[in-house]
Image: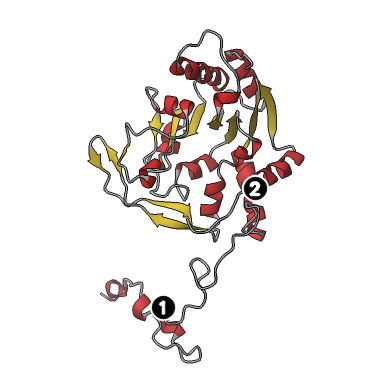
Amino acid sequence: MKLISRRNISGALVNVGVTRGSTIFLMTDLAKVGAIPGVKTRDSFCAVYLDAIRDVIGTDGTIVMPTYTTQVARFDMEFIWEETPTILGLLPEFLRRQSGALRSLHPLYSVTALGEKQTFICSNNSTTNFGWNSPFHRMLQTETRVVTIGLPSGYIMGMAHQLEAMCGLPYVYNKLLKWVPIVRGRKVNKSFSATVRHLDLAFSYDLARHVRVMRKQKNVNSAVLGGSWVHSAKYTTVFDSAAKQLADDPFYLLKEPPKFIENKIPFDGATAGRDGIADNNPNKANWAGFYLGGSQDPGGDESDLWA
């Protein structure tokens, strides 16, 4: 295994475009990168990485990492905001435990941030995992860079699920969650949801396809670090360019379209008899009444206006 140093890490980050004041959304797999001489514990190993990142972004920069806890849903566990560990490895868990770091509240898809913009990204969020006012939406509103260390370049598409949620793609759905955060011993009184895949709908991703497109456009930077790579791109560039492709092809992120089954959700066909319209004759149905009144009446304040 190759040896690396704090200076090697910070140098690689600079080489891929990270600068002082940067906000970075970081994903890592440190197993293949290299050993750090003199480091004997997991925490001291992670501390070298965190220090190297801070050397580059400074006190006015922000590091954001996913601290997902999907084990909560898989095994029907409680999500204790202050305690439940992430399943995503050493560095995200180390960041989560740092004094002053801020974790968002989503019981399955939290992120943890440390730095200048941590409050903007991780507080007062919506109850969706990837939708409007989620931490991922907030990162779109800042000059965030996606950075990967030790991972294949396809992980530059780390916001792929956000694209699925915000572009309304047909192979995912919004799941109402039974789990809520427990904060300081009390359950948060809100309903949380998550954009997730249909479990009985098989498909595989091909995220590297868009990375190759962006690399041809010179929108992806890469640098060697030890026995692996550091990759980086602007968050908005990745998102906007992929969203443009998805506007023409909703299966752009996949190797091939899923094999949908007709008359089964999400490809569930005609709605007559299931949609609340009493008359199933298309020539007689009261379309105006359906959309503007009747069982779908949205209500109004006209009585207040007449008063």
Q: Quadrant of the N terminus?
A: top right
**Residue placed most toward the observer, 184 or 34:** 34
Q: Which residue is mark 1?
A: 274
Amino acid of disc 1: Arg
Amino acid of disc 2: Asp
Q: Which of marks 1 and 2 precedes in the sequence?
A: 2
Is 85 displayed left or right of 48 in the figure? left
Q: Which mark is residue 123?
A: none
Could you say whether the residue bearing mark 2 is in a helix, strand or loop? loop
Mark 2 surroundings: few (<14), some (14-19) or many (≥20) residues within 10 A? some
Q: Residue furthest right?
A: 216
User: Depth-wise, is mark 2 or mark 1 nearer the camera?
Assistant: 2
Could you say whether the residue bearing mark 1 is in a helix, strand or loop? loop
Return the x and y of residue 235 as percentages of the image width and height: 59, 39
Q: Which residue is mark 2?
A: 206
Can you tell which quarter of the image residue 67 is in? top left
Is 7 displayed left or right of 270 in the figure? right
Residue beneath the point at 30% across and 41% down: 78
Check the image and report above or below for 65 versus 180.
above
Q: Residue furthest left?
A: 185
Return the x and y of residue 256 as percentages of the image width and height: 65, 56
